[in-house]
Image (tube, rainbow, N blue to C red):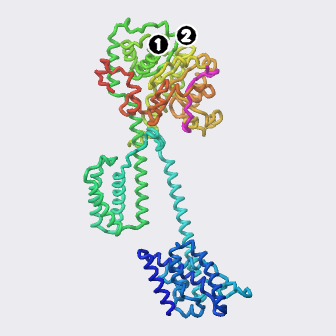
């Protein structure tokens, strides 16, 4: 006992003098290391100690071995403390070691004493048994080598310990398995939810694009939103556990935070008193956490809130799609006013003043001919105006404009008042094409059918916004107009022409286009810009490949191309009987089983293998739906196309692209001013 007390006093005094600011954890580490050192250095039997020289040799050998294990764990200063505390102890025999109460420090191995760090006990249990090699005779102390790590435990305790270890291992394995299964279930559910989300969006968004980066972190706004979410969680849990006072306090703070946050999306939008409200909310949430927090319940509630938010997002997305499709079908009041005023003025003109000059150019194959089919006066004026202003030789350009009978007077009157410079223009009425009848044109026959009328005007009228968004875009009135299908009858409309450039009315011309007539189409009919840079612009996006007729004749990965600016070789068109091919497939699709309504799918089919790809700089698309079109591509393009719902003449047009279109509108024109059309 004297030796033990001397050791303890010396160790403590030396430790305190050298490390007065060290904590209890460091002291326990040193004490554990000292125990290892004592065990490795002095744990021998009395029968092996014959002489002082033998003992010193044994001690030197054991000290070196102990230092090999201890040095990587302790600093040099700590090792100096251990050496200074043990230099005067002298050799300890096994009997004296047992007689000392130091054996109590080893009982934690079997009894798991709470006074000793469990981690230290596990490390000691892992120490390998050290064999003692004698300096004379090479004898080995087998009593130390074969002694178990818990030599003071009886067999019953050893069995119980093994059972406890097995139970711990089994519980750990079960928890890991449950965690993996839960993760798999969540991932599967997320994948299924993502499949059901409608993919029709107004535009594309990528967090990697520079223009979408947000330099303002808005940490305060996000923190307030997190507090509001947690307040709702604790209100639900408090209601379940009848914590009425706490629930009332949370509700009051929740209302204050919601009023303070309002519609703010940035920290700069917040009011001055927000930090105080955040602090008060934080105190209430801390109080609620102490009383209500349950990991399982909180996780379940947050998951339920997430699913509810996901359902709301999908509902709002459908409503947004419905409204955007509805807005795309409408005609702004200003354009409707313009058309009515021009129509009245046209029919007040005497017949001799309703004719355009230069009618001899209309069938001259040596000039540059354009085909434009539109019922929008303002849009058609931008196409013609932009093309003429950017043409090098405007006198060689001829514009063939076809409209319907409602807008025929307005189109004529506009271009009579605003002639396109030296260029030639001619306006026709599609309803006066007598050859275009239901007996010749499959689309007209299908539009007159009872099934089509039922589809458009009677069946499945939606009672809610979200319910009506599914097929609304296929019920657009443009699919009922022959102006949309007239592009498949170009040789019939212009039989004397060899080549013609087809333009949509939602494009803007930015460069001279005469180079397109010199492009070698290599025997193909259609020259167009391909759009297969992304997967959804391939054939399987537009055609039903589950139908054997489609699967047999077309490649689902074939590259799509864009309508809107197409150079057509009408000689090859007639030779290949393109209109006949179109009629064949249109008749097969009477029940809409091959593709949905529209002109691009039948165009892809009709011109399959007959389309020559143009350079992409000729035609840049996406200004009516994609907010991330590269500005450099727009400015270098010969033609930009506002394909999509966000047309430049609508209020929902994207402001960043509108100026490319509006600069060709004559806003100072008297008719436009009267109809209150402005930028």
Going 43% across and 54% down the picture, which residue do you hit?
A: 307
| Magenta residues, start to end | 520-536
Closer to the chain start, of discs 1 and 2, is 2
Indicate the secondary structure of the residue bearing disc 1. helix
Which of the two residues, 422 or 211, is positioned nearer the viewer here? 211
Question: On the rendered image, what quadrant is the C terminus found in?
Answer: top left
Residue 362 coordinates in the image, percent (x, y) = 49, 10
Q: Is residue 602 visible?
A: no
Going 35% across and 62% down the picture, which residue do you hit?
A: 236
Indicate the secondary structure of the residue bearing disc 2. loop
Q: CA distance from mark 1 to mark 2?
A: 14 Å
Going 47% across and 34% down the picture, which residue do you hit?
A: 629
395 versus 254 height, above or below: above
Which of the two residues, 63 or 481, is positioned nearer the viewer here? 63
**Callout 2: 10 Å neighbours few (<14), some, many (20+)?**
few
Q: Pointer 2: what residue?
A: 366
601 versus 228 height, above or below: above
| Quarter of the rendering containing residue 646 | top left
Residue lying at the far left in this picture: please name it. Answer: 273
Residue lying at the far right in this picture: please name it. Answer: 137
192 versus 452 height, above or below: below
Q: Nearer the viewer, mark 1 or mark 2?
A: 1
Q: Pointer 1: what residue?
A: 394
Going 58% across and 90% down the picture, which residue do you hit?
A: 92
């Amino acid at each position: 006992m004297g030796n033990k007390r001397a050791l303890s006093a010396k160790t403590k005094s030396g430790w305190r003098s050298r490390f007065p600011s060290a904590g209890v954890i460091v002291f326990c580490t040193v004490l554990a290391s000292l125990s290892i050192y004592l065990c490795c250095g002095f744990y021998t039997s009395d029968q092996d100690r014959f002489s002082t020289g033998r003992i010193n040799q044994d001690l030197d050998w054991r000290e070196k071995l102990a230092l090999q294990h201890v040095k990587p764990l302790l600093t040099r200063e700590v090792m100096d403390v251990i050496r200074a505390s043990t230099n005067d102890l002298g050799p300890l025999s096994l009997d004296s070691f047992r007689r000392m109460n130091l054996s109590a420090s080893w009982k934690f191995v079997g009894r798991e004493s709470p006074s000793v760090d469990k981690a230290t006990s596990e490390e000691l249990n892992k120490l390998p048994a050290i064999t003692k090699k004698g300096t004379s005779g090479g004898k080995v102390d087998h009593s130390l080598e074969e002694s178990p790590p818990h030599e003071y435990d009886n067999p019953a305790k050893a069995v119980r310990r093994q059972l406890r270890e097995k139970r711990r291992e089994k519980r750990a394995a079960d928890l890991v398995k449950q965690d993996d299964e839960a993760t798999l279930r969540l991932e599967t559910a997320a994948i299924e939810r993502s499949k059901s989300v409608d993919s029709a969006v107004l535009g594309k968004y990528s967090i990697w694009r520079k223009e979408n980066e947000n330099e303002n972190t808005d940490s305060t706004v996000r923190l307030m939103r997190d507090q509001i979410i947690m307040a709702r969680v604790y209100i639900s849990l408090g209601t379940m556990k009848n914590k009425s006072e706490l629930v009332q306090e949370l509700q009051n703070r929740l209302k204050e935070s919601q009023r303070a946050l309002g519609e703010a999306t940035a920290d700069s939008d917040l009011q001055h008193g927000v930090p105080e409200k955040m602090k008060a909310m934080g105190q209430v949430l801390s109080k609620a956490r102490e009383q209500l927090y349950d990991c399982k319940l909180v996780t379940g509630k947050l998951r339920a809130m997430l699913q509810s938010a996901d359902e709301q997002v999908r509902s709002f997305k459908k409503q947004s799609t419905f409204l955007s499709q509805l807005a795309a079908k409408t005609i702004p009041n200003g354009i409707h006013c313009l058309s009515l005023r021009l129509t009245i003025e046209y029919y007040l003109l005497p017949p001799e003043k309703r004719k355009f000059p230069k009618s001899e150019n209309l069938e001259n194959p040596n000039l540059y001919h354009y085909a434009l089919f539109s019922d929008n006066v303002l849009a058609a004026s931008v196409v013609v105006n932009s093309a003429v202003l950017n043409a090098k030789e405007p006198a060689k350009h001829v514009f063939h404009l076809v409209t319907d009978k409602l807008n025929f007077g307005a189109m004529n009157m506009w271009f009579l008042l605003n002639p396109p410079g030296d260029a030639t223009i001619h306006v026709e009425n599609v309803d006066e094409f007598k050859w275009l009848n239901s007996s010749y044109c499959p689309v007209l026959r299908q539009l007159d059918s009872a099934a089509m009328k039922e589809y458009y005007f009677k069946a499945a009228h939606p009672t809610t916004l979200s319910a009506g968004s599914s097929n609304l875009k296929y019920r657009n009135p443009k699919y009922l107009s022959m102006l949309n299908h007239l592009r498949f009858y170009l040789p019939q409309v212009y039989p004397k022409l060899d080549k013609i450039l087809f333009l949509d009315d939602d494009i803007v011309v930015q460069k001279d286009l005469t180079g397109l007539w010199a492009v070698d189409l290599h025997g193909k009919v259609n020259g167009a810009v391909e759009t297969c840079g992304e997967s959804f612009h391939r054939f399987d996006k537009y055609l039903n490949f589950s139908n054997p007729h489609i699967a047999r004749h077309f490649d689902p990965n074939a590259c799509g191309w864009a309508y809107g600016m197409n150079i057509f070789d009408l000689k090859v068109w007639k030779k290949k009987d393109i209109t006949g091919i179109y009629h064949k497939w249109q008749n097969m699709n009477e029940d809409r089983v091959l593709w949905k309504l529209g002109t691009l799918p039948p165009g892809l089919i009709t011109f399959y293998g007959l389309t020559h790809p143009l350079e992409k700089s000729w035609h840049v698309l996406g200004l009516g739906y994609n907010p991330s079109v590269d500005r450099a591509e727009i400015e270098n393009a010969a033609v930009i196309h506002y394909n999509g719902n966000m047309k430049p003449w609508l209020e929902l047009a994207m402001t960043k692209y509108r100026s490319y279109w509006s600069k060709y509108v004559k806003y100072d024109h008297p008719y436009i001013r009267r109809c209150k059309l402005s930028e």
